[in-house]
Image (cartoon, rainbow, N blue to C red):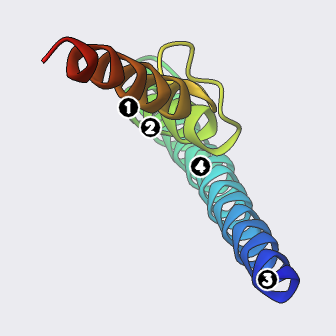
Amino acid sequence: MENQNTDNKYLRAKERVDKLKKFYANLWSYIIVISLLAFINYFTNNFRYMWFLWAALGWGIGVFFHAMDTFNLNPFFGKNWEEKKIKEYMQEDGKENKWN
């Protein structure tokens, strides 16, 4: 039993580390590519029209939601939301069964 708990903790930790690695890879890719696009934009028209900002905005929204998922920053469906809902529904189910 204790060995299984250790294995579960290891798997959860490994999963968390994988999520972090993917987020940081996404963030670094964003920084490098957007910087490259900004340089290209500058050298082609000296920022008369900053078209690279459209790519930065679109990809930036994706990076923002990726960060929310990675660092559990979702205000609506946080870390314990699922557990709380399961317990709530189990309690409701138990109350209904008493009266049937």
Which residue is disc 1 drawn over?
A: 58
- Whole-Å distance between the Cαs marked 3 and 2? 40 Å
* Position of residue 52 in the picture relative to residue 29 (left or right): left
Q: Name the residue type under label 1.
A: Gly
- How many numbered callouts? 4
Q: Is residue 83 above or below residue 7?
A: above
Does 15 appear above or below 80?
Answer: below
The N terminus lies in which quarter of the figure? Answer: bottom right
Question: Which of marks 1 and 3 precedes in the sequence?
Answer: 3
Q: Amino acid at mark 2?
A: Gly
Residue 95 in the image, given as x and y percentages of width and height? 32, 14
Hey, what amino acid is under mark 4? Tyr
Between the C-alphas of marks 3 and 4, the distance is 44 Å
Read off the residue under disc 3: 1
Q: Is residue 16 left or right of residue 9?
A: left
Label disc, if present, on residue 17 of the rendered structure: none
- The residue mark sitting in front, 3 or 1, is 3
